[in-house]
Image (spheres, rainbow, N blue to C red):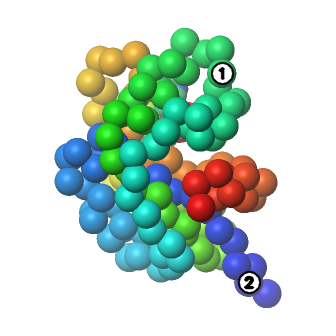
């Protein structure tokens, strides 16, 4: 029995600026997941603070909010059985230098020497976070 799992994917402002939005969405569709909703918007700090509440107080938290509010990003609700785990596998490791080739972060990302890693994509890490994050942005 398949479940209609959902995840929140964000193509972050670095991905938008570099013209990689289509490439990321292409990989999601090529994998076989469904795009259920799409929206381009510049994230506001209030909702980013909710979204990233688990990281409050960490050294990269303020740089993360600055980076994420620095320009347009694309928000997607992605659907499919096991898409949360599946998209995290497509995205690769948080550190784009360590992310394996073949992954979005490994193929398209790099370390720019900033306080926060600009790593192109966000993907929810569990069903509860996915529903919480989707409610923030949609
Ligand atoms: P992920 O996006 O892989 O779920 P996370 O939730 O731990 O990673 O962190 C959120 C974002 O914050 C991450 O995509 C990039 C940035 N980040 C995380 N850890 C970092 C670190 N040690 N130094 C710089 N930026 C970091
Ligand atoms: Mg995370």
Task: Classify 10 Å Cα crowding around label 2: few (below 14), some (14-19), many (20 and above).
Answer: few
Residue name at image x 55 percent, y 12 percent: 59
Viewer-side residue, 4 vs 110: 4
- Along the line of sight, which residue is nearer the eye, 131 or 43? 43
In the image, is residue 7 above or below residue 50? below
Residue 14 image position (x, y, % from top left): 30, 40
Location of residue 81 in the rendering, given as x and y in whole percent from the top left corner: 66, 76
Q: Is residue 87 left or right of residue 99?
A: right
Q: Along the polypeptide, which appears first: circle 2 or circle 1?
A: 2
Label 2: which residue? 2
In the figure, residue 28 lies in which quadrant? Answer: bottom left
Which picture quadrant has residue 137? Answer: bottom right
Q: Which residue is drawn at 55% across and 67% down?
A: 77
Reading the image, the residue beneath label 1 is 56
Residue 92 visible at all: no
Question: CB atoms at circles 2 and 1 under 8 Å apart?
Answer: no
Give the quadrant of the C terminus. bottom right
Residue 125 image position (x, y, % from top left): 66, 49
Q: Give the spatial CA distance, label 2 vs label 1.
A: 36 Å
State the SS at label 1. Answer: loop
Above or below, 128 against 53 in this view is: below
Element type where label 2 sits in the image: loop
């Amino acid at each position: 029995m398949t479940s209609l799992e959902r995840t929140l994917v964000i193509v972050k402002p670095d991905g938008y600026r570099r013209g990689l939005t289509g490439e990321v969405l292409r990989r999601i569709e090529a994998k076989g997941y469904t795009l259920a909703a799409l929206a381009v918007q510049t994230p506001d700090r209030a909702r980013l603070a909710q979204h990233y509440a688990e990281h409050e107080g960490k050294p990269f938290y303020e740089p993360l909010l600055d980076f994420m509010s620095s320009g347009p990003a694309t928000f997607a609700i992605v659907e499919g059985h096991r898409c949360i785990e599946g998209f995290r596998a497509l995205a690769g490791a948080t550190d784009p230098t360590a992310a394996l080739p073949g992954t979005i972060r490994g193929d398209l990302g790099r370390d720019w020497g900033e306080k926060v890693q600009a790593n192109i994509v966000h993907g929810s890490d569990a069903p509860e976070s996915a529903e919480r994050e989707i409610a923030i942005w949609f």
